[in-house]
Amino acid sequence: MVVATQSLETLCINSIRFLAVDGVDKAKSGHPGLPMGAAPMAFTLWDKFMRFNPKNPNWVNRDRFVLSAGHGSMLQYALLHLYGYDSVSIDDLKQFRQWGSKTPGHPENFETKGIEVTTGPLGQGICNGVGLAMAEAHMAAVFNKPDCTLIDQYTYVILGDGCNMEGVSGEACSLAGHLGLGKLIALYDDNHISIDGDTTVSFTEDVGKRFEAYGWQVLVVPDGDTNTEAIAAAIEQAKAETGKPTLIKVRTTIGYGSPNRAGTAGIHGAALGPDENAATRKNLGWEHEPFVVPADAKAHFAKAVERGAAAEAEWNKTWETYKGKYPEEAARFERQTNYKLPEGWEKCLPTYSPGDKALATRKTSEITLNAIAEAVPELVGGSADLTHSNLTYLECSTDFQKDAYAGRNLRFGVREHGMAAIVNGIYLHKTGLIPFGATFLVFVDYMRGALRLSALAETQAIFVLTHDSVALGEDGPTHQPVETIASLRAMPNLLTFRPADGNETSGAYKVAIERRTTSSVMAMSRQGLPQLEGSSIEGVERGAYIIDGDLDLPDIILIGTGSEVQLCIEAAKKLREDGTKVRVISMPCMRLFEQQDDDYKNAILPKATKKRLVVEALTSFGWHKYIGDEGDMISVDRFGASAPGGIIMEKFGFTVDNVVAQAKKVLG
Amino acid sequence: MVVATQSLETLCINSIRFLAVDGVDKAKSGHPGLPMGAAPMAFTLWDKFMRFNPKNPNWVNRDRFVLSAGHGSMLQYALLHLYGYDSVSIDDLKQFRQWGSKTPGHPENFETKGIEVTTGPLGQGICNGVGLAMAEAHMAAVFNKPDCTLIDQYTYVILGDGCNMEGVSGEACSLAGHLGLGKLIALYDDNHISIDGDTTVSFTEDVGKRFEAYGWQVLVVPDGDTNTEAIAAAIEQAKAETGKPTLIKVRTTIGYGSPNRAGTAGIHGAALGPDENAATRKNLGWEHEPFVVPADAKAHFAKAVERGAAAEAEWNKTWETYKGKYPEEAARFERQTNYKLPEGWEKCLPTYSPGDKALATRKTSEITLNAIAEAVPELVGGSADLTHSNLTYLECSTDFQKDAYAGRNLRFGVREHGMAAIVNGIYLHKTGLIPFGATFLVFVDYMRGALRLSALAETQAIFVLTHDSVALGEDGPTHQPVETIASLRAMPNLLTFRPADGNETSGAYKVAIERRTTSSVMAMSRQGLPQLEGSSIEGVERGAYIIDGDLDLPDIILIGTGSEVQLCIEAAKKLREDGTKVRVISMPCMRLFEQQDDDYKNAILPKATKKRLVVEALTSFGWHKYIGDEGDMISVDRFGASAPGGIIMEKFGFTVDNVVAQAKKVLG
């Protein structure tokens, strides 16, 4: 294939291709195959359809773009650079995958302006796309007026075979079909190649038919390497269908242009190297030096800056009108999208006194969530089909359903992983929404792939995870968390709360709502817990605090969390009968405590007091930092059992008497 | 509905129903809705189709039954009891969900004979079913002879809406369609109800069409509450289709028979209680006391014992013939299905000397896996589309594909969660197969729901998880494990290995192959590691050992795992220059070390030596048990970064110089 003169379009598409090829070759690491094959669809999408302002990547009504096949990150970096985003200079492209660069191996929203979501782990991006489209639908339903449209944008996703093999994408796409998210448009880079070779090795299902079964419109572009008109026509048709999301199967050749490796797994994840790079340049008639974009192409791409400024200026006019006509809604819109919470919102948080009724923390969670929902209208969320077990229904609102997108109760179905990825997407719409998802704590294992991205991508997601220990009882070991909370405490940038009562529940939510770039897990009890003397919101905010005892150096420190704090307090009473000086620490959030200054930490847990007993009906793993060399722990270092919860707790040693006995042992 | 005299069939079906109802009512806990609705299909299946011998639940050629909707456990317990399994007496049914009973809240293969797999977490059972069918296909392909069929059995699964909403089931069912597993027959209890109410709330996709897209045969029984003939006809038709798995959509009414709660979420997971129980008895014309099975029904069910004995006797004749004609294959069959490893198999394990070439442990893993594959023919497995990154291809065999089921290389596609659940199913076929699955370590988060069941259900699964730290480099934080290994170490009954070199790799596999009821994780490096002086298979078998130094009480102990052990050894050399007595501990498996006796533990890690430094390029979470009050650690307590691996390791302090510096700090 020799191309004498290239059309402007080809020039632009090849500009994308070769920035990707050269970036990967310079780094000697990365994935050139996808950018080379998907460049035509990406160019068509960004050039003819995507509405964005490169000079203001945060413009609220921009179209959202997600590269679900995140390994093709150079495609997205090339697009950002060519279309005029200041976040990705040509030097940044040359620094692809280097220490401290703006162009890491996979797209990271927290590193590079213009990247909406963090992708790489396959399947996540398309689910984030579902969340973005849900957020758009909700914001539009809440704020738009018949004569004034503030929010009206599309979510575009490019996904690959890998994304489509992952179950998580099936979960979210099934829900997207159910919800009729007409403004979600996914381009499936259907190149028949995954890392192990041709997809015939393991993936021969009819993807289009599956998406039709989900309720999507499915379109096919058989010649996606070359026929940009067909791609454009398909996107038009997708936009015309307002009641369903659309999947456009775009048949492409991975590594298009590489004479020896196009259409093979060999081009997926390895640099071309000098020889194949040269051969590809020759093959595509590309005579430019590495990282050089031809002037004609440059000029064409540059138009996006003007186009984007004009689009935003137009929107600003609407916004001015809106502010004049709907000052109340405008004030909320401004507040929310600027990540300000309603003034004094925290006054809604319930507090409790020791005389108040014993309640499960899943119940105090319900009370708190509902109180917050009234004070903080940007709180939206729901459960993965356990609404009445997790107790997460927001009574002040309705269901979020097709044609009823103003509802704030999300119905995820039995789709925990999809839920968490959607929740991430809702947050990453960056219009101030605070999303939550709920299931049983043990099933956080189903959604951990997405939860890790909640933490990494600096989202503010709240996961309400009830039934937090073996005390849940009869459902047995498949349903009983043991190692689960330890596995969450180990994760960077995630706050794991296990409140002991109502006040601590309020404290946990206070932190979770106020931290706008940190996700939180709420581990809540199934069983009733008494309202404790000494529990407080402020205590929770410091991670751990003295709930019983004073600042005098104690003989022994009992440390408990959640349902076991009451045992420590009761045991302390008994231990004091002998004159033992006992301090009880409630530690609802280990990480928050670790973030305190040394003075506070030493005051609470003085190094001099080496006699310590930790009581938590979960694994001991991760506790020895606080147990120390001379302490001990009452823990559950095995899987649970099926029996009434009270009996299990007794059999496993979670009784006041046993706490007293073990404490005496520690005291020696 | 008043029934004067019931047909024998109705009597039997109602016997199942009321054992379930009464069991749940007595426990005041459990899920009556599914058993009541699914009793007709379960009875039809067990009575007319299932081939099993109640008096020998381990008969190798039995049909396998999986209740994927595990919350309906009373259905399965009732069936086991009625059909004559000794494992579930009427007293056991009365002990449903009680401490120490054989009838826990969800079916557990390790508690109750006749239960094939542990279910409860939704979607897992159907995936286990895919694994069971793959194991059947493989065993049949390996052992059957044209004139002598040893293995020829069906896998039947009952699954519900919840299972079908979970992405994991989509992953496995897509693969099952690809593989054309004709002997997998799934009955979908299509009752339109999940915990949150009618499935119209969140689940309106066309499930049948989706399964057709996967390549399944899909049949529909519209009147599954009453039309057992239609159910039987559908199962016949399913068996007739030998080239595809079959999904039979059986439309049922949840809680069938309950006059006030049938067809509602209210019957899903709560006891009927005295009033509704009485009303249901009246409604279905059931005049028997709780837990009483009418004599006619009893007599009918009892026939299964004879039927089963006859079926096994028939098979035993075939087996005798087989033994005579094919002594070599018979010997292997007998050995393997009795869980004996080939004598002297461990001689195949490669060993290395310090002069040998530096190799990544993913590479020594490949060498070891291939050596074992030759010596241990029951080893089967593969990767989730990362075969050539995980290095798991067994060169001595071929691909396991449709019409080529003798192959031992499984091609899972990008389906980590489905893979792990399938691997569990393959093991739980209990014909001695040792299955493994592979992906990047960080993506264990995608499969954790199934991995937890590997551990809980006492399976022997091996997970080869490569790219084990930030040292993997450019792919960046989405791909870099940090908290991952801690989260695995926290899980009961799971062995997590992080070998330092080739000898330790062999040691890890030795343990993993020999432990027949424990699953193992192999965390393997991407980067090359030197063969260490002092590393050994025996050391790994004890979890931790002195790799450098002697039994004299040291001044400081350096503890490393995996790629950081070499740093400890080099640092020790430098520290000794000042006369410091240094011991280096390699700890490839924390849990194995904890299982050693106190003498060994104290010899390796003497309490008297409080100066300790742990070096691991992962989170410090979980290490303080060994760090102690006076020790320290070089760790990664943040997410990683995108850059060449060597640079990241240097930036994060994983250099010999820094180990020396931190050790000196600890020494004070």
Image: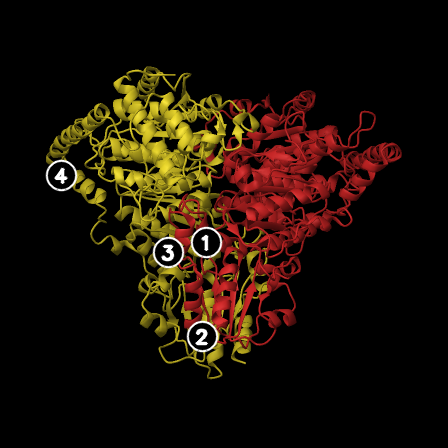
Chain colours: A red, B yellow
Tell me the subunit letter for badge 2.
Answer: A
Tell me the subunit letter for badge 1.
Answer: A
- Earlier in the chain: of badge 2 and badge 1, it is 1
Q: Is residue A43 above or below residue A218?
A: below
Task: Give the alpha-carbon distance from disc 2 to disc 1, as whole Å.
Answer: 28 Å
Q: Can you identify the residue that label 1 sits on?
A: A483
Q: Is residue B327 above or below residue A568?
A: above
Q: Can you identify the residue that label 3 sits on?
A: A651
Task: Determine the secondary structure under disc 4.
Answer: helix
Residues at marks 1 and 4, common chain? no
Characterize the local packing of mark 2: few (<14), some (14-19) or many (20 or more) Cα atoms within 10 angstroms. some
Task: Give the alpha-carbon distance from disc 4 to disc 2, as whole Å.
Answer: 66 Å
Residue A667 tag number: 2
Asked if labels 3 and 1 touch by Cβ distance under 8 angstroms, the answer is no
- Identify the residue at image location x=16%, y=42%: B331
Q: Can you identify the residue that label 4 sits on?
A: B327
Q: Is residue B462 left or right of residue A261?
A: left
Task: Give the alpha-carbon distance from disc 4 to disc 3, as whole Å.
Answer: 52 Å
Asked if labels 3 and 4 touch by Cβ distance under 8 angstroms, the answer is no
Q: Is residue B633 left or right of residue A187?
A: left
Residues at marks 4 and 2, common chain? no
Task: Determine the secondary structure under disc 1.
Answer: loop
Asked if labels 3 and 2 touch by Cβ distance under 8 angstroms, the answer is no
Q: Amino acid at mark 1?
A: Glu
Query: Where does residue A647 sit, x and y in percent of width and height?
Result: 39, 52
Q: Amino acid at mark 2?
A: Leu
